[in-house]
Amino acid sequence: MGIKEKYKTLRAEIPESVSIVLACKTRTLEEVQEAIEAGARDLGENYVQEAQEMYDSLGEKARQVRWHMIGHLQKNKINKALRVFDVIQTVDSAEKAFDINSRAERAGKIVPVYVEINIGSEDAKAGVEPDYRLILKLAEGISKMDYLHLEGLMTMGPRFGDPEASREYFRKTRVMFERIASMDLPRVDMKTLSMGMSNSYKVAIEEGSNMVRLGTIVFGEREEKK
Ligand SMILES: *Cc1c(COP(=O)(O)O)cnc(C)c1O
């Protein structure tokens, strides 16, 4: 199956209420164009520079999609990131939130953000520890920042292995999501629970995800890093 058919088949299978963010790392312009022609409207990028290049190369098409930052965001890349991305899914500390907020203020925009939770991630550095107190405190902190709008949580979970092993992590993330939502904080509108990748999206949706981030299953295996 080509990329177009793959995307369309998945779009038909996955409930309408669940958004599909295509994880574009390592993919070519042609591959991403094909996905957009098949109807993809949300693109995820892990690096600011690659996102900028993809954005520029896509021309008109770049404006048909929402751009999601799903990789680690370095402080010195925030200004650039704000020019490309519509959503930053990887806020993992008060300090990072503060830095994004101050740059957003200068740019005169409100930036939708998600808090990334490190639930059983293989990359031990990405995300906030899955500790309720820490996460609620971070949500409260963000709610005091005028130029950030907290709209969800994101988690990776293990990328390989039995997807059933991710179920408990997804469940925990959902509980946190609901706890933050029930706090009724200003500038917080918990709409999106971003969890599930190619190997785990079905389990994630069963556990309440309404945004899955898919790469391999649409585009095929990635080449090994050189
Ligand atoms: C690469 C990536 C994905 C997609 O992973 P696949 O296993 O290729 O579906 C999802 N989320 C993040 C943050 C990623 O970096």
Image: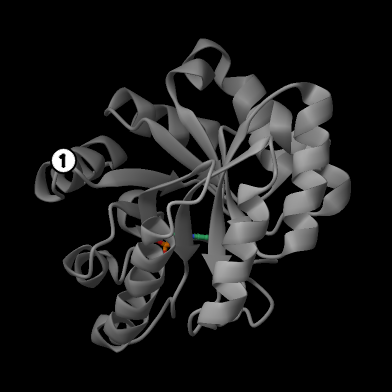
Q: Residue at x 43, y 59 (%)?
A: 183
Q: Is mark 1 within 8 Å of ligand 1?
A: no
Residue 16 appears left or right of 100: left
Circle 1 crowding by C-alpha within 10 Å: few under 14, some 14–19, many from 20: few
Q: Percent from the top left, x then y, of residue 76?
A: 88, 47
Please name the amino acid that badge 1 sits on: Glu
Instruction: State whether residue 166 is above or below residue 104.
Output: below
Rendered residue at 43%/18% (across/down): 64
Instruction: Give the residue drawn at x 28%, y 28%.
Output: 39
The answer to which quarter of the image holds residue 20 is top left
For the point 32% across and 23% down, which residue is it? Answer: 37
Residue 153 picture location, percent across and down: 46, 59
196 above or below 211?
below
Q: How many marks do you count on the picture? A: 1
- Of residue 149 and residue 67, the one placed in the foreground of this image is 149
Q: In front here: 53 or 197? A: 197
For residue 224, what is the image quadrant? Answer: bottom right
Residue 66 left/right relative to 149: left
| Residue with the most extreme right position | 76
Q: Which residue is mark 1?
A: 16
